[in-house]
């Protein structure tokens, strides 16, 4: 005897998954995530722009006020605009493609724009050294950034000592320059990181929203497949049976029509459950439906089960497995008999569905083919259970689901 087996084992609930019966609609979660205000990244950018504007205006006004010449004013504005443009377009821009070559060129350009005007504008331009130090902290790793910041501070102290009013500047002036430069550098670094973090968070929330929508679509497709398959198959079988019975056995045909009406109402209720995201199936009801559907297909069916009442997640999952298993018997086999058993075994519940006649053009179908078995494996494994499928060469098919009773409390 050769047996092909497929099994799904649980390792706990996967990240991002939720219990089937928790009543939470994934679409609502996605809508909440999509509601995240689009203004958040704009606010972060606005704060950064406001700080840069304040630093620039302070330097420009001071230089223009003391120089009083038109060309100095033009030069000041041009240098400031270039510095701010590099800062916003590359250094603090989250979407900028940063490479070593571009980073080196940008830092060199900022260094030229910061150091060269000092010879013209004097100490009033020192405020922009903090902008350069902040860019270094943003763009370079710490092992390189902090030594370069030290170089920037040393250089500005040198300029203060040599270009100031006195040959040897007082200690408080040097301290003032160092502290002011570091404060500006840390402010630029913090705001640039804020813009980056807000942008990353915004992108992550959108990705979570997209994943929530995808998960909800997957849940919907699984539920539609698993819940409606048996109902529609049973309605089709009973319709064919009723058509054969109309002439010779009208009373029995009427009985089959009444059964079809019950099944159609049940299918409608299943559709509503799928739409609401709330799934609570009864194993007892599924056993009765399986008996009716298989009997209508002229399959000799025998159902054995313990007296234990199963509800909650365990009952719902086993009912789903039973429904899909019976659907497969009706659709994919020429079964003459089907045996269904539900037993308590060492802290777990075992559902077994066995039938004959599983052949398609003389060959047995793959036990894990189609979405049905994959869906069942997913549902059973989420409760810490195991789903096993076996197909024997003689056409005997076995579907077994083991679910721990401890999962009833989830």
Image (cartoon, rainbow, N blue to C red):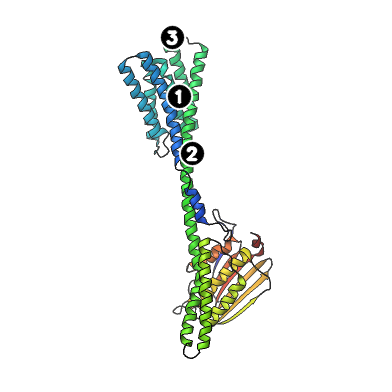
Q: Is residue 48 left or right of residue 348?
A: left
Q: Is residue 32 visible?
A: yes
Residue on which the image places disc 3: 165
Q: Position of residue 82 (x, y in %)?
A: 35, 27
Residue on which the image places disc 2: 197
Q: Is residue 3 visible?
A: no
Q: Earlier in the sequence, mark 2 or mark 1?
A: 1
Q: Position of residue 11 (x, y in %)?
A: 59, 58
- From mark 3 to mark 2, how far is it between C-alphas? 43 Å
| x 61%, y 63%: residue | 313
Q: Nearer the viewer, residue 368 or 223?
A: 223
Q: Image quadrant for the C terminus?
A: bottom right
* 10 Å crowding of disc 3: few (<14), some (14-19), many (20+): few
| x 47%, y 21%: residue | 153
Residue on which the image places disc 1: 130
Q: Nearer the viewer, residue 356 or 341?
A: 341
Above or below for 10 versus 137 = below
Figure disc tally: 3
Q: Earlier in the sequence, mark 3 or mark 1?
A: 1
């Amino acid at each position: 005897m050769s047996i092909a087996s497929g099994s799904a084992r649980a390792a706990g609930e996967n990240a991002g998954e939720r219990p089937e019966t928790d009543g939470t609609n994934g679409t609502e979660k996605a809508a909440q995530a999509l509601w995240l205000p689009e203004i958040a990244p704009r606010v972060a950018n606005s704060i950064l722009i406001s700080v840069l504007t304040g630093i620039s205006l302070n330097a420009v006004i001071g230089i223009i006020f003391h120089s009083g010449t038109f060309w100095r004013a033009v030069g000041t504005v041009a240098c400031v605009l270039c510095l701010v443009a590099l800062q916003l377009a590359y250094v603090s821009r989250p979407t900028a493609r940063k490479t070593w070559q571009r980073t080196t060129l940008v830092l060199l350009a900022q260094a030229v724009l910061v150091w060269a005007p000092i010879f013209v504008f004097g100490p009033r331009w020192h405020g922009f050294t903090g902008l350069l130090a902040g860019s270094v902290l943003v763009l370079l790793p710490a092992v390189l950034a902090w030594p370069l910041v030290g170089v920037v501070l040393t250089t500005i102290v040198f300029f203060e000592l040599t270009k100031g009013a006195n040959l040897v500047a007082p200690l408080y002036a040097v301290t003032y320059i160092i502290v002011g430069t570091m404060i500006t550098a840390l402010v630029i670094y913090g705001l640039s990181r804020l813009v980056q973090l807000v942008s990353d968070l915004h992108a992550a929330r959108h990705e979570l929203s997209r994943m929530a929508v995808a998960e909800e679509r997957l849940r919907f497709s699984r539920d539609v497949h698993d819940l409606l398959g048996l109902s529609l198959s049973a309605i089709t079988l009973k319709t064919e049976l009723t058509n054969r019975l109309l002439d010779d056995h009208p009373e029995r045909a009427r009985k089959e029509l009444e059964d079809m009406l019950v099944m159609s109402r049940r299918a409608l209720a299943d559709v509503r459950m799928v739409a609401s995201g709330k799934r609570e199936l009864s194993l007892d009801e599924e056993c009765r439906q399986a008996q009716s559907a298989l009997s209508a297909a002229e399959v000799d069916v025998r159902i054995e089960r313990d007296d234990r009442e199963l509800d909650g997640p365990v009952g719902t999952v086993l009912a789903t497995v039973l429904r899909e298993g019976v659907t497969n018997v009706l659709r994919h086999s020429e079964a003459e008999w089907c045996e269904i058993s539900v037993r308590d075994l060492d802290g777990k519940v075992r559902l077994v569905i066995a039938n004959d006649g599983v052949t398609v053009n003389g060959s047995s179908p793959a036990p894990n083919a189609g979405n049905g078995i994959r869906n069942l494996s997913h549902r059973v494994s989420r409760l810490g259970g195991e789903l096993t499928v076996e197909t024997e060469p003689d056409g005997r098919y076995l579907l077994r689901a083991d679910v721990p009773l401890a999962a009833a409390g989830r």
